[in-house]
Each structure stands twice: as C-alpha cells, then as structure tokens.
Image (cartoon, grey):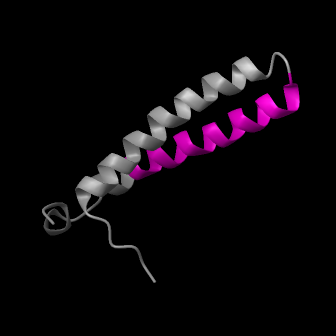
C-alpha cells in the first residue's frame, strides 16, 4: 500500500524531521560527554532523520503540479 500524502503533509513532515533531527543531534552531542554510546546512538538516529527530511525536499520538488494542489 502506497501512502498518499498531500504536498502540505510532505512539507510539514519535512521540516519536522529536519529541525527535530537538528535538535536531537545537539542532544546527542551533549549526552555523549557523559555516555558516549548513548550520545552517538542519538546522534546517528538524528542524522538519519535529517537525511530523510532532505530526501523529502527532493520528493516534494518532483511532484506533479496536480499532486501539489491536493
């Protein structure tokens, strides 16, 4: 089953992933000072979230105009 997301939903998800990932990345870097394994784990998950957000920017740019207006 394919998810049918509107352009607005993709935009919202994109920015939540990017800014949430940046916040989590900062948290991971701070936590890594006291617990390296946990901090690196948080930072890796945050990095993945940021990359997914950037990929969604590309996906949004490649949508057909008819899909963008939904």
Question: In the rendering, at what x and y percent does residue 42 appear?
Answer: 71, 36
Left or right, 40 with respect to 11, comes to: right
Dividing the picture into quarters, in which one does residue 5 lie?
bottom left
8 vs 70, left or right, is: right
Instruction: Identify the residue at image location x=77%, y=38%.
Output: 41
Residue that lies at the very extreme toward the bottom in this rendered image: 1
Residue 52 is a magenta residue: yes
Does residue 12 sit above or below 34 in this rendering? below
Which region shows up in magenta?
A: 35-57
Number of marks in the image? 0
66 falls in the magenta region: no
- 4 above or below 30? below
Overall secondary structure of the magenta section: helix
Asked if residue 21 lies left or right of residue 1, the reply is right
Taking the spot 42% from the left edge, 78% from the top edge, the residue there is 2
Where residue 58 sits: x, y (%)? 38, 50
Position above or below: 24 against 9: above
Q: Residue at x 30, y 48 (%)?
A: 11
Residue 6: quadrant of the picture: bottom left
Q: Answer left or right for 35 relative to 64.
A: right
Residue 57: x and y in percent read 37, 47
Q: Quadrant of the C terminus?
A: bottom left
Q: Residue at x 39, y 50 (%)?
A: 13
């Amino acid at each position: 089953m394919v998810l049918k997301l509107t352009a607005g939903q993709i935009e919202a998800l994109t920015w939540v992933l990017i800014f949430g990932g940046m916040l989590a990345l900062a948290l991971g870097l701070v936590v890594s000072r006291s617990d390296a394994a946990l901090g690196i784990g948080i930072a890796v998950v945050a990095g993945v979230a940021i990359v997914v957000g950037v990929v969604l920017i590309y996906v949004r740019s490649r949508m057909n105009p008819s899909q963008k207006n939904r």
